[in-house]
Image (spheres, rainbow, N blue to C red):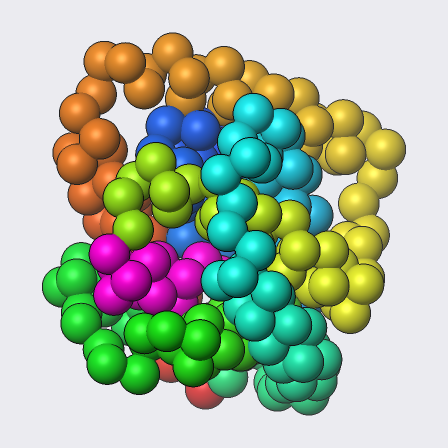
Amino acid sequence: MAGDALLAGIVLLGASVQWLTGMGFALVAVPALVLLLGPVEGVSLANCAAGAICLVGLVGGWRYVRPAAMVPLCVAAACTVPAGTWLTRRLPEPWLLLSMGGLVTAAVLLVLRGARVPALRGRRGAVVAGAAGGFMNSAAGVGGPPVSLYALNAGWTVREFVPNAMFYGVVVNAFSVASNGVPELGGAQWALVVGAMAAGGLIGRGLASRIPEKRARLLVLLLALTGGVTAVGKGLWGM
């Protein structure tokens, strides 16, 4: 019972920050889901939930999707998703926790720094970001940071970034679910997850007009950094 309540709380928090800032479900929720459910089930659930949230969020912004950038991003992601799944299925759990926590931590630090990377510009940059995002999404549930860095280097505004990130999230999570499978949760747990996602959406939308965007994004990244470091610590402890 306590585990189910904790599961609902993690999904609620992740969904809230996703609707509040347009990003962050996986960054915030994955480290905690991995610690609660294990690496394979935690990543699979994150793929399902993040994909569903992106699909709902895309409804009002699909007209702003940039096909010229999204096609190479999504095709590259589709090519690397199986490699992430392969890695997740073969590494021992302590190594998985260490790898996932390390990926989250490194990605957050790069985004916090606003890293400018010449390789993440133009069509080549889209392919590099998409490939990295696909691998990270299926292996660790966090495929968004490479796309964030690509958008930063491409000079996109927040209004341009959000619908394109949502579109990418739908596609890459669909591939990841097809590769990783659906998590083995009971009917009551699925009901809790869906309810938490809906409640998180309402909370996030309600807070969006009250919390400055920069402060909200910083909070998301700090939460994600804490989760990533915790996962690294547990991985090291288990080795």
Figure check: 213 above or below 149: above
x and y percent of residue 236 in the render?
A: 38, 80
Residue, x 61% and y 21% (percent of image)?
198
Q: Is residue 209 left or right of residue 212?
A: right
x and y percent of residue 8 in the render?
A: 59, 31
Of 111 and 155, nearer the camera is 155
Quarter containing the C terminus? bottom left
Q: Does the stretch in magenta take in 146? A: yes
Assign the magenta stretch its main secondary structure. helix
The residue segment tinted magenta is 141-155
x and y percent of residue 161 in the render?
A: 38, 46
Q: Does the stretch in magenta take in 119? A: no
Of 1 and 27, nearer the camera is 27
- Asked if residue 184 can be seen in this view, the reply is yes
Looking at the image, which residue sits at the far front? 68
Figure check: 116 above or below 162: below
Figure check: 201 above or below 50: above
Residue, x 53% and y 61% (percent of image)?
68
